[in-house]
Image (tube, coloured by chain):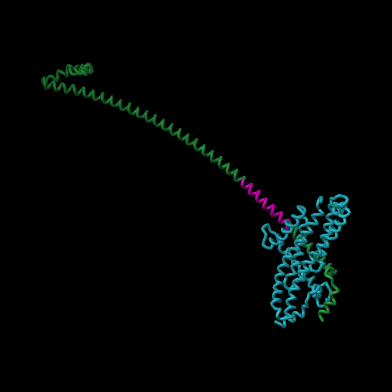
Amino acid sequence: MTGRTIVLASEVPFPPSVEDFYLPSIVPWGGHDYWFTKITLLLWITVAMLIIFFLVAYRKPKLVPTKRQWLAESIYGFVRNNIAVDMIGKEGVRFAPYLTTLFCFIFVMNLWGIVPMAQISPNSHIAFPIILALISWVMFIYLGFKKHGIGYIKFALVPPAPWFILPILVPIEFFSNFIVRPFSLAIRLFANMFAGHMLLLVFTLGGFAMINANALLTPISILSWLMTIALTFLDFAVIALQAYVFTVLTASYIQGSLAESH
Amino acid sequence: MKSVDYLASEAEHSPIVPLWQELVLGSIAFAIICFVLMKFVFPRMEETFRARVDAIEGGIKRAETAQAEANELLEQYRAQLAEARTEAARIRDEARADAEGIRQDVLAKAREESDRIIAAGTEQLAAQRESIVRELRAEVGTLAVDLAGRIVGESLADEARNRGTVDRFINELDATGPTGGRR
């Protein structure tokens, strides 16, 4: 037991650093190449899982659904009715497929953060949230121009306010609508997943560090590991919430672009 | 040793600078998943939802039609039943009237028959009475003659036969009979 602890402790230095997020390649010849890492593996597994699940569940749709078909329909129905239609209105049905894909993708990517053996979310690498945020950003701007033509610039930047306050409001609107939105989307998701992983690392490695430093600290180490388990549950809530928030905000931006007036 | 390694490489990574390899792979992966799910899965779900709504609404409509049909049939049956009832009542009335007529007929016939029988009886009686009277008349004459002969004498019989006294006497009796009865 002690020997194993020491071995583990020597393998995992404390405190955890940002470098713990950048794992070496999983192919033997890869070295520190980033094409084949645990992160990209989890990414491909996510894609494969979702595609296989939905294709299998919806291979032969029936009016009276089977259990798996019902589950797939419930996921879609949840995003369609509770996010797309609620936020955007009747037109939202058009965006439901994308929003559902987005929601499922983020959710499963996040979920890896608490899946045993995986235990790191690809979304804790900012590259993936950036891609998703960029798509949302391009999408709502494109929809705005499509709906309002060139008038979208005025629509988005000039709020109905007295003229003398516009010099202040217009830059603020520009900043908040076109710069902060994509950043906040990407960073919110990334930071939550990053922090979740970091917390689990701190409490897991901290337990080893303490037991290694002094045998008398064993109870506190155990407490620390129990905290890891508790934090895993907390992390699950964060995972679901962040997937939901990202989708809802995207829907909300789309709604803002499609609105007739402020 | 290892921690030195980590410290050395720590400068390489900043958590908010994306790795370009991951940007590329992430874009490809997300594009694939979007393509498949948005093309092959979710539109079919919308179709299924629509089909389900159609099925339910169609079912309700079918049920309504069936209900209306059933109501119509019920009305029809009721009307037929009422018709049959009036028909039955009419037939009953007719039968009653027929029965009454037949009864009257039978009665009339019976009365006629009885009248006829009575008439025949009366006639027969009269005839019998006539014949009896005739017989009696003859007998009474004979008896009276016999009696008178016995009283007056045997010889008178021949004489009475010869002169027709007895007949005369009887005829007289006949003529005075009714007045004699009153006396």
The number of discs equals 0
Residue B110 location (% of width, % of height): 37, 30
Q: Please, is residue B107 above or below residue A210 in the view?
A: above
Check residue A106 for magenta coloring: no
Which one is nearer the viewer's eye here, A8 or A58? A8
Q: Which residues are magenta?
A: B44-67
Which one is nearer the viewer's eye here, A135 or A7? A7
Which one is nearer the viewer's eye here, A106 or B50? A106
Q: Is residue B169 left or right of residue A63?
A: left
Q: Please, is residue A130 above or below residue A159 in the view?
A: below
Which residue is painted at 78% across and 75% down in the image? Answer: A15
Q: Which chain is cyan?
A: A
Residue A101 visible to the viewer: no
Q: Is residue A73 left or right of residue B107?
A: right
Residue A254 location (% of width, % of height): 80, 56
Residue B115 visible to the viewer: yes
Q: Colour of chain B?
A: green
Tell me where residue A135 sits by quadrant.
Answer: bottom right
Check residue B47 for magenta coloring: yes
Residue B27 location (% of width, % of height): 82, 65
Q: Residue furthest bottom?
A: A3
The quarter of the picture where the N terminus of chain A appears is bottom right
Characterize the magenta stretch by its predominant secondary structure. helix
Tell me where residue A137 sits by quadrant.
Answer: bottom right
Residue A78 location (% of width, % of height): 72, 59
